[in-house]
Image: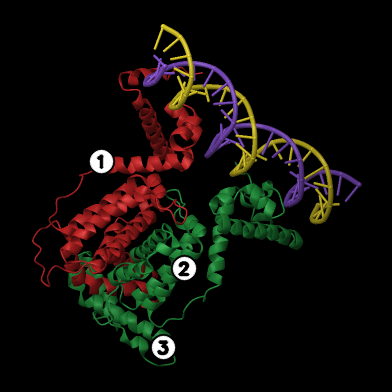
Chain colours: A red, B green, C yellow, D purple
Amino acid sequence: MGRVEDLQIEETAGDAAVSGRDRMRAQIVEVAAGLLATGGRDAVSTRAVAAAAGTQAPTIYRLFGDKDGLLAAVLEYGFATYLAGKPPLDPTADPIADLRSGWELHIEFGLTNPALFLLMYADTQPGKRPAAAEAGLDILRTRIRNIAAAGRLRVDVDLAAEMVQAAGSGAVLALLAVPADQRDPRLPDAMFEAVITTITMDANSTDTSTTGTSTTGTNTARATRTAGVIAAANALQAHLPQLDELTDGERHLLDEWLTRITH
Amino acid sequence: MGRVEDLQIEETAGDAAVSGRDRMRAQIVEVAAGLLATGGRDAVSTRAVAAAAGTQAPTIYRLFGDKDGLLAAVLEYGFATYLAGKPPLDPTADPIADLRSGWELHIEFGLTNPALFLLMYADTQPGKRPAAAEAGLDILRTRIRNIAAAGRLRVDVDLAAEMVQAAGSGAVLALLAVPADQRDPRLPDAMFEAVITTITMDANSTDTSTTGTSTTGTNTARATRTAGVIAAANALQAHLPQLDELTDGERHLLDEWLTRITH
DNA sequence: ATTGAGAAGCTATCACTGTTAACACGATGA
DNA sequence: TCATCGTGTTAACAGTGATAGCTTCTCAAT
């Protein structure tokens, strides 16, 4: 029998008694979040969490109802904690840049908290979406509404938000499904570019953007300039096995060059 | 600890014995697939599967190693079964239309088999992708390669395939996370539109236009393919001075090869 | 100050899970 | 004929989520 919990009790002795329950609740959530982050979902068992928090399994059920309640609390806590560690919200200069920052927030959250991210978007039984996912969607919806307010949104806000969220979760899932050293770092940017050009329209027909922060304009300009080159390289690469005019060695070398061009 | 890795050794043992084993294996997989479809992931327990298949739990471990092996077999079976019930593959008229049909195949698979879909794309522990997911990606990659062969692909094949897959899984996940009557039916089409306009270019916006694909003739397929090769080589040669990715020597050598191809 | 009520701790337990060991049966191949 | 190996079957082990029921403690009301 461990008498270790005396320390915690004395720690909270100065606080009000009502905070004892909240303290224990918070500690359980934090411990569970730690177990989830280090050991994945299977590491979060009621007994393991209770032991690490210095209590017993029934306490979890008294405070959270059941294990799903605990996981929901962990998800909410983890998401809120992550958001709290980030710039709370941008004022606003360019609404599309603001959306991009929200996008990057989501991507980074997924890549740094895979277990939480899976809980958030991929663990749900059909029909129910966790509150944290709804909160994330609200963040996107708010920023998209600013784009709409600027008169640059092509589709309705709800569809645009779902598209951004779907693109983000899909990109993160695709990245997570592959070893870290084999991930294509261009995927998130490419996905955002695809969605943003579909749901928005240019401010003017002429590119008046002077700030270098927006990579959209420069990338698009460069992309259209070299699109023909890349398309030609892709086409040649697709036909590579049929290039009887080249030797095996030449084909191999050409493949490397074309990959260098297209990537 | 599974000590059963001799699955492929007794392939040549006997006919009756092998068929008996395979029969049992197939029945277990089918039963497990049924349980997964009706009751979700939690309904697939070794005892439940064994009982429904008329055997005992240890049989599963002899045939599949462990439960993950069983689930992998179920996923493979479910995906293959779904594909078998669909038009096997299109010949080719418009490569983009072909990609769209592959896209719709994936979306429909996810919506009609949520549990399998989650197993495929959302259940993976970081770093490992199930074989069925790789197979699905290959379907997309093949069709995208046809777009590249037509000289209309803006980005490299791998990135394009990952984008399409990410957009598809993200869209399905977003749809599944919401009650069926609240789903926005425009989401999949909108996502495809976003991706396809980003990764491809219009047929007439490139100097490698392969309008010859519609030319008539007996050897149309092969003839147009070589025509596409030559067009791509010509386009690449025209843009040779802009290929900053290559050194002077490489550019010179590439020039010789392209000349050899086009002549 | 006593008391009563309710919250919390704690043990034991249930039904179930994945997984494995151990034994019995049957056919197969030498 | 015999030894072997695949298979069927039972039993068991270690954990899991979840509850019941007991004990202890706190604290406001009397």
Q: Is residue B20 left or right of residue B99?
A: right
Q: Which residue is mark 2?
A: B108
Q: Are marks 1 and 3 in contact (CB under 8 Å)?
A: no
Amino acid carrying mark 3 in the image: Thr
- Which chain's residue wears label 2? B
Q: Nearer the viewer, mark 1 or mark 3?
A: 1
The numbered dot on residue A190 is: none
- The residue tagged 1 is A84
Displayed quadrant of residue A163? bottom left
- Vertical order, A246 against B109 (above or below): below
CA neighbours of label 2 inside 10 A, class few (<14), some (14 to 19), many (20+): some
For image coordinates 37% across by 58% down, the residue present is: A170
Residue visible at 43% across and 71% down?
B104
Mark closer to the observer (3, 2): 2
x and y, in percent, of residue B194 in the image: 30, 68
Residue type of the residue flagged with mark 1: Ala
Q: Chain of mark 1?
A: A
The answer to whether tags 3 and 2 share a subunit is: yes
